[in-house]
Image (cartoon, grey):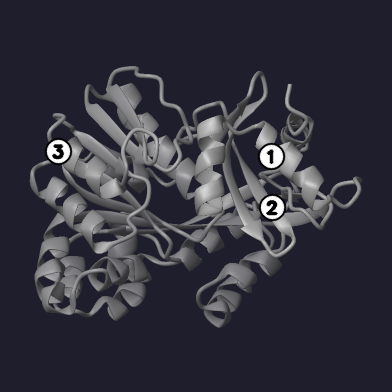
Amino acid sequence: MARLDSFLRMVVDQKASDLHFHSGTVPIIRHDGDLVTLPFRSLSEEETARFVMEIMTPEQRAVFEKQKQIDFAYVVEGCARFRVNIFMQSRGIGSVFRVVPDVMPTLEQLRLPPAIRRLAKYPNGLVLVTGATGSGKSTTLAAMVNEVNRTMRKHIITLEDPIEFVHVPRESIVTQRQVGKHVDTFAAALRSALRESPDVVVVGEMRDFETVSLAVSAAETGVLVFGTLHTNSAAKAVDRIIDMCPEELHEQMRNVVSTLLKGVVAQSLCKRANGEGRAALTEILLNNYAVANMIRENKTFQLDGYLASGEALASGMQSLDQSILARVKEGEITAEDALRYARYPDTLKTLLATIPEDA
């Protein structure tokens, strides 16, 4: 057993999400979003190197020595799988280990709105899952893929860097490819995927115009494409897709996205009021005539306002603040935390004041 495994087991035992293992500091875990120092000595540069080098294969060490950073998945048998990033920093080697649960999440367990199941059922189109790092995007996306896998006969191809949740084929065929290991780039993997008779393609991260262009092309051919972005709202996700294109293609891409987009899930995580874990706060945008028109006419700045409308709510959409308000009414998060995460705190504060004390 590698010496680092004992720290990783501690992360899982403490129900934490991350281990920060950097030379020049003591090991630190992230528990419910907060950083907690472990009772251990400050790590020297040489000691940190010994710990992290021990868990890398010779091939991974060669990549790290050449590029000064590396991403990969690491498994502690009988414990959990971890997404690993090792890098060089001013005091030597740094590393972050993110826990990937070994139990496949379901939409029901995550208490995600019914509209997200609808997005997973589409036969084709583009679905975006967005949020900041650590917002639970990967977990929500895994639950959506799991929904397809267990209820439909499809060929699902996931393109990831690295592979996080491992999907065991159930009703569907599941092909998982790791960028850097099974294929060189996301773009190359997407080009190949289009020749592999896919029904669903999952793009772990849409980072550049080539990847976006190929993902859109896949959706145009009748494939359901799930993609992730690092934005904190549905409107900004649409803008990001457009902005990745050369300026002369913006109008064309707006027209295409207005047709192909099925929906956007923008997510944050907030501590539960009982102190046990975190709750997902989800903004959901579904495409319809009004939404498509705003995208096509470059009026995405109106999407936030539309999401708060009765028309949007009646069709299964919800704004971030509506999601937050519902969580407060259910007693799942506190009003104080709600205001910290709200997009429009003053408006939400007024709505919170209408909730009975014993609700």
Q: Is residue 281 left or right of residue 33?
A: left
Disc number for residue 52: 1
Q: Name the image quarter holding residue 159.
A: top left
Q: Name the image quarter holding residue 172.
A: top left
Check disc 2 and give the amino acid type: Ile
Mark 1 neighbour density, 10 Å: few (under 14) some (14–19) many (20 or more): some
What percent of the width, then of the height, locates residue 97?
64, 43
* Residue at (78, 52) in percent of width and height: 45
Sequence order check, earlier mark of 2 and 3: 2
Check disc 3 and give the amino acid type: Leu
Q: Secondary structure at mark 3?
A: loop
Distance, label 2 to label 3, CA atoms, is 39 Å
Q: Do labels 3 and 1 touch, CB within 8 Å?
A: no
| In front of the other: 42 or 254 | 42
Q: Which callout, 2 or 3, points to the residue nearer the camera?
A: 2
Which residue, given by chain and number where applicable, does mark 2 sit on?
93
